[in-house]
Amino acid sequence: MEQTLPYRWYSDPDVLQRELELIFAPAWQYVGHTGQAPEPGTFFAARCGRTPVVVTRARDGELRAFLNVCRHRGFPLAEGAGRRETLQCPYHAWTYGLDGSLRSAPRSEELADFDRCTLGLVRLALDSWGPFVFVNASPDPEPLSDALGSMPAQVAELGLDVDDLVFYTRWEAELEANWKVVCENFLECYHCSVAHPQLAELLDVSVDAYALSTDGRLSSQHGPTRESPRTRMHLDGELPRSQFHFLWPNLGVNIFPGRPNISIGPMVPIAPGRTYRFLDYFFGADVDQAWIDELMAFDDQVGAEDRVLVEGVQRGLASGGLEHGYLMGRSEQLIGHFQALTRDALEGQPQPR
Ligand code: FES
Ligand SMILES: [Fe+2]
């Protein structure tokens, strides 16, 4: 039987530090959506993993990302979202254009060697997939399309056009669990019939029907709907089945059967035993409110069930009583894939395409 990663890796601050450097620093991260900076003169603050970023749309219409840290003495520059031509630091009022250039700094004329041109905000790589905005804070990132792999094609093949979706809401939570516990919970449905009775009524989660596949850094779960679902959810609509994607290291994407819908968001480590999550929900423009309410209530229920599971696992792993656990063959093959990618990265191996 395959063994899990050592349990020590789920509570050791040194392991988290190595993960941040070797796994998160080079990774593209979902930060938000184009609707948050819809027109010239708008911006929103976000985080790329643990890096604070600000996404702006300057007068030229281009979407850009910058490190959200003032070049003067490091105060975070932007908060929330807004509509304005410049970003002014609340500490000493250095003022930057939405193109990142430093426009003014009080008393800078007193310094002969003050070079405004070299003190603009630090630019980060930004790219998007439909309305979904991704940022990469490393100096020389791979193209976003390489990182996304076959996910956009799989979503399109299901019949979902991401460009037609409208942002609905953001759900946020902090969980008392290591980020890997949260990801691993996402990566298997071995627990679904035990822990998510409503989900198991909606989808056929049996080992033969519920298809698991990997492709590079992407893990996918394709669940057919049940023939005669007893669930209260109404499944008829454009999308014939569910797709749950996980893009290593930490992005989850959920599509439920029925009307056009998707939710997307990262699992971000904030401490060895603590993870921040958000999920942005999008629906087709003409999906009725009643269907949206059904899906949100259903997903809330599943999320509450998963919180109990991951927080329980964290207590077990951190107890120190066991050195590792076991993976259940094909049912947990995606966890095996996740753990191999994680282990390889921590050992400095190149990442697969
Ligand atoms: S830290 Fe931003 S102006 Fe001083
Ligand atoms: Fe679950």
Image: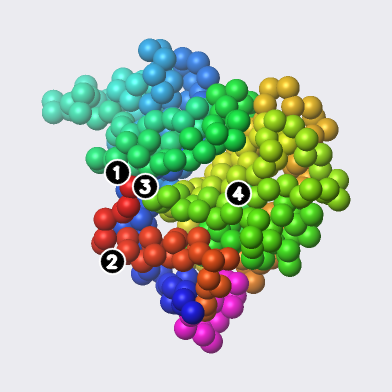
Is disc 3 surrounded by few (<14), some (14 to 19) or many (20+) residues within 10 Å?
many
> Type of residue at label 3?
Ala
In the picture of the structure, the residue carrying the numbered disc 1 is 138
Residue 8, picture quadrant: bottom left
Indicate whether 94 appears above or below 142.
above
Q: Assess whether mark 4 and mark 2 are in contact (beta carbons under 8 angstroms).
A: no
Spot occupied by residue 214 in the image (x, y as percentages of width and height) = 46, 53
Residue extent of the magenta highlight:
313-324
> Type of residue at label 4?
His
Q: Assess whether mark 4 and mark 1 are in contact (beta carbons under 8 angstroms).
A: no
Spot occupied by residue 331 in the image (x, y as percentages of width and height) = 58, 66
Residue 324 visible to an observer of this rendering: yes
Q: Assess whether mark 2 and mark 3 are in contact (beta carbons under 8 angstroms).
A: no
Q: Residue at x 39, y 65 (%)?
A: 340
Is disc 1 surrounded by few (<14), some (14 to 19) or many (20+) residues within 10 Å?
some
User: SS of the residue at dot 4?
Assistant: strand
Q: Earlier in the sequence, mark 2 or mark 4?
A: 4
Q: Nearer the viewer, mark 1 or mark 3?
A: 3
Q: CA distance from mark 1 to mark 3?
A: 8 Å
> Type of residue at label 1?
Ser
In the picture of the structure, the residue carrying the numbered disc 4 is 222
Q: Nearer the viewer, mark 2 or mark 4?
A: 4
Q: Residue at x 67, y 42 (%)?
A: 241
Q: Earlier in the sequence, mark 1 or mark 2?
A: 1
Spot occupied by residue 98 in the image (x, y as percentages of width and height) = 39, 21
Q: Earlier in the sequence, mark 3 or mark 2?
A: 3
In the picture of the structure, the residue carrying the numbered disc 2 is 347
Does residue 1 appear to the left or right of 307 in the view shown? left
User: SS of the residue at dot 3?
Assistant: loop
Q: Residue at x 65, y 50 (%)?
A: 223
Q: Residue 27: which numbered mark, if any?
A: 3
Q: Nearer the viewer, mark 4 or mark 3?
A: 4
